[in-house]
Image (cartoon, rainbow, N blue to C red):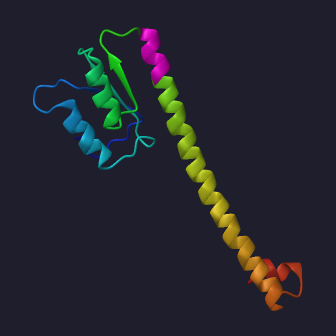
């Protein structure tokens, strides 16, 4: 795999010469969850069993070649949006947890009598 690279999404062909797409998929999933890095499997095989296998291993989506440009773009946008909003939720959650820590600290100071004025909260 390519190291020190940042990706928003992976399109992975199942049938590759050296290593199967499923093997590459497993390696990627060791490091990234499906919402962190969406993977869309691509294949020329159009058997339902292949689709089921791809989705059962946890692929975000599955496209059978040949596919239309419109379908490709629509699926790409959908999974990029999901990933973007997941990352936004993680960041907002981090900020919320920080605010909770500050509020608890202020509440503890107030209840312990260590605060005589509002500036005491911020000047410590």
For the point 42% across and 35% down, the residue is: 8
Point out residue 116 in the picture as x, y percentages from the top left corner: 88, 88
Where residue 4 sits in the image (x, y, percent)? Answer: 30, 46
- Relative vertical location of residue 99 with respect to residue 15 in this rendering, above or below: below
Q: Main secondary structure of the magenta part?
A: helix
Q: Residue furthest right?
A: 117
Instruction: Residue 107 in the image: state x and y as whole percent.
Output: 78, 79
- The answer to whether residue 114 is visible is no
Q: Is residue 90 above or below residue 39?
A: below
Which residue in the rendered view is the most extreme toward the left? Answer: 18
In this image, 120 relative to 22: left or right? right
* Residue 38 location, quadrant: top left
Residue 50 in magenta stretch: no
Q: Quadrant of the N terminus?
A: top left
Comparing 43 with 116, the one in front is 43
Q: Residues in magenta?
A: 69-75
| Closer to us: 63 or 120 | 63
- Residue 24 relative to residue 96: left or right: left
Tell me what residue is drawn at x 18 percent, y 23 percent: 15
The residue drawn where x is 72% and y is 75% is: 104
Q: Nearer the viewer, residue 35 or 56?
A: 56
Q: Residue furthest front?
A: 49
Please indicate, yes or no, whether residue 120 appears anywhere in the rendered image: yes
Residue 67, quarter of picture: top left
Q: How many marks?
A: 0
Quadrant where the C terminus lies? bottom right
Question: Which residue is located at x 26 percent, y 23 percent?
Answer: 50
Left-right relation of 19 to 40? left
Q: Who is closer to the viewer here, 61 or 69?
A: 61
* Image: 16 above or below 123: above
């Amino acid at each position: 795999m390519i190291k020190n690279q940042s990706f928003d999404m992976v399109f992975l062909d199942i049938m590759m010469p050296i290593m199967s797409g499923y093997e590459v998929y497993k390696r990627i999933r060791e490091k990234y969850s499906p919402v962190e890095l969406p993977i869309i499997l691509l294949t020329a095989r159009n058997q339902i069993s292949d689709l089921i296998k791809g989705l059962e291993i946890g692929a975000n989506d599955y496209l059978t070649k040949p596919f239309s440009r419109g379908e490709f773009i629509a699926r790409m946008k959908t999974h990029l949006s999901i990933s973007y909003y997941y990352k936004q939720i993680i960041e907002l959650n981090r900020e919320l947890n920080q605010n909770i820590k500050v509020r608890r600290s202020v509440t503890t100071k107030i209840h312990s009598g260590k605060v005589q004025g509002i500036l005491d909260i911020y000047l410590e």
